[in-house]
Image: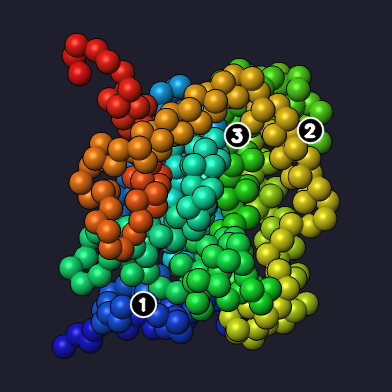
Amino acid sequence: MTTAPSTANLDLHLAPYAAHSTGTRGRVHAEAASSSRSEFQRDRDRVIHSTAFRRLEYKTQVFVNHEGDLFRTRLTHSLEVAQIARSIARNLRLNEDLVEAISLAHDLGHTPFGHAGQDALNGCMKNHGGFEHNLQSLLVVDELEERYGGFNGLNLTFETREGILKHCSRVNAAALGELGRRFLEGTQPSLEAQLANLADEIAYNNHDIDDGLRSGLLTLEQLDEVPMWGRHRAEVAAAFPGINGRRAINETVRRMINTLIVDLIETTGRNIAAANPKSIDDVRSAGTLVSFSPKVHEEAQALKRFLFRHLYRHYLVMRMSAKAQRIITDLFGAFMQDPRLLPPQYQASGQGTDQPRLIAHYIAGMTDRYAIREHRRIFAVSESD
Ligand code: MG
């Protein structure tokens, strides 16, 4: 006779201060435990099967989806974040399933066209409660996904939702009850949430260098002024004399990612040893424990400043951002002026969600290419339409 596997065993290797799935604060709608998967494995699987997750393939951060097949999309970005976060979590005996669930879900609420899209939609919603992509990610998993018979959203655990909500204004936090409390009280989320946040930074700083060079918007000469790049590029030249081109770039970037990961593991390990938390509750009331060493933190900041100056503010990126702003502002204006242009499920019924918020949900859910096509469908006059 075989006994049913106990999911409690899945937590045995974890540190006492990790998020244990058996100790979860649970889901909004009570569900029977799975016989084969931990609570956080289930969360991750629900994210992967969601509609919003598949849309990430056609949403971008810096480069718009049609600009090239080799640039990162939000989907590949999220996979890189999950990979980095899991490596670190395993070293620190934190919950890999939870960091994976948080990482894969962290960008689900992003608008089309990255930050330009977010800023434009927030501007449109200025007099209607604003728009914040991080809060939207939470709303996607809490409300907007329609997959289950018994409830809206994905009904994820408190810990995954806590990790998705990286930052939050006091006004919004006050409306979120238990989940928003830490923003009002200044306490910390789980180590897994703190970790997913920094894994996001490691991923985008490095892949934006890679994509920036690939696109020709950044040059190797410019990058020489960045200490972290210079240091690793010199190491690569010493290890492989004569190496150049893509192979030299890739070897340098992978070493930078490794340095950041190793530094984060070592520094966080020391922070944990010093604070000596005995449980996840101790973690929540301690200061920030997941961090880089001061030296690596400074180098990472210098890299960010470089990317901001030379890539995110590059005139070709600014041109695309201006177009993105116009597309989103035009669409929002047209739908506000005549909501009958909206698909029926986004037309306000007079009860429940108001019209501006429904328009924001519709626009935020669009992929880059869908937004471009929708703009054409609404504004372009041609015989074929
Ligand atoms: Mg991200």
306 and 357: which one is in front?
A: 357
Of the two numbered discs 2 and 3 on the same chain, state the one appearing first in sequence: 3
Q: Position of residue 107 (x, y in %)?
A: 47, 50
Q: Left of 211 or right of it: where is 309?
A: right
Inter-mark Cα distance, 1 to 2: 47 Å
The local crowd at label 1, few if under 14, some if 14 to 19, many if 20 or more residues have their Cα within 10 Å, is: few
Q: Position of residue 196 (x, y in %)?
A: 56, 59
The residue sitting at 30% across, 38% down in the picture is 338
Secondary structure of residue under mark 3: helix
Residue 226 badge? 2
Which residue is disc 1 drawn over? Answer: 28
Q: Position of residue 266 (x, y in %)?
A: 72, 62
Residue positioned most to the top: 383
Which residue is disc 3 drawn over? Answer: 208
The residue sitting at 54% across, 65% down in the picture is 172
Image vertical order of residue 277 relative to residue 256, above or below: below
111 and 290: which one is in front?
A: 111
348 and 60: which one is in front?
A: 348
- Label 3 or label 1, whichever lies nearer to me, is 1
Inter-mark Cα distance, 3 to 1: 37 Å
Image vertical order of residue 385 relative to residue 112, above or below: above
Q: Amino acid at mark 2?
A: Val
For disc 2, does the CB lie below 8 Å from ligand 1? no
Q: Amino acid at mark 1?
A: Val
